[in-house]
Amino acid sequence: MRIILYPGTFDPVTFGHIDLVKRAIELFDSVVVTVATNLGKQPLFTVEERVNMLKESLKDFENVQVDSFNGLVVDHARSVGASGILRGLRAVSDFEYEFQMALMNRKLANNIATVFLMPHEKYTYLNSTIIRNLAELKSDISDFVPPVVAEALKKKFK
């Protein structure tokens, strides 16, 4: 069974993230979407809230699991039996950082490949920071995130 791990902060999950899951399902037998704790970020939502939003947003997908972890991505990939780590590339600006991470992950675990996928072009401009900013300014975000996320953002920015 070919399993791929899709780690991210997902603060919050967007239709761009979900598009990558759809693409990964076509290539792998199972996708594990995992909420990573990034010590360099101050998330708006707790890990539990992000896991719950992901579970609700991905509930109709077969062969997709959602979890969370602390530590090295390659260690978590090993623990779930993943042969790859999925990373999304929206623009050239994403590539340099993702390339460096892929090389480091290969050094740490050369049997786990990094797979880069691009989302559909209609999602290339989306990122969670922009979504949070729009929500804080009371803008309509329904074209960018699942309903569960839109509702959670409304509650955060009452």
Image: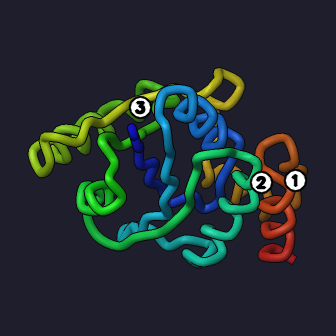
Residue 108 in view of the camera: yes
Q: Marks 3 and 1, Cα distance to the nearest angstrom?
A: 26 Å
What is the number of callouts on the image?
Answer: 3
The N terminus - image quarter: top left
Q: Quadrant of residue 21?
A: top right
Q: Position of residue 155 (x, y in %)?
A: 84, 76
**C-beta proximity under 8 Å, tags 1 and 2:** yes
124 w.r.t. 136: above or below = above
Q: What type is the residue that disc 2 sits on?
A: Leu
Secondary structure of residue under mark 1: loop
Mark 2: few/some/many CA within 10 Å (<14, 14-19, 20+): some
Secondary structure of residue under mark 3: helix
117 w.r.t. 157: above or below = above
Q: In the rendered image, which residue does mark 3 sit on? A: 93
Q: Position of residue 45 (x, y in %)?
A: 63, 74
* Closer to the camera in the image, 121 or 96: 121
Q: Is residue 158 left or right of residue 114?
A: right
Q: In the rendered image, which residue does mark 2 sit on? A: 134
Q: In the rendered image, which residue does mark 1 sit on? A: 139
The C terminus - image quarter: bottom right
Q: Position of residue 48 (x, y in %)?
A: 60, 78
* Closer to the camera in the image, 29 or 44: 29
Q: Is residue 134 left or right of residue 64?
A: right
- Mark closer to the chain start, 3 or 1: 3
Q: Residue furthest front?
A: 1
Q: Is residue 12 left or right of residue 92?
A: right
Q: Marks 1 and 2, Cα distance to the nearest angstrom?
A: 5 Å
Q: Is residue 118 left or right of residue 99?
A: right
Q: Marks 3 and 2, Cα distance to the nearest angstrom?
A: 22 Å
Q: Residue at x 49, y 73 (%)?
A: 42
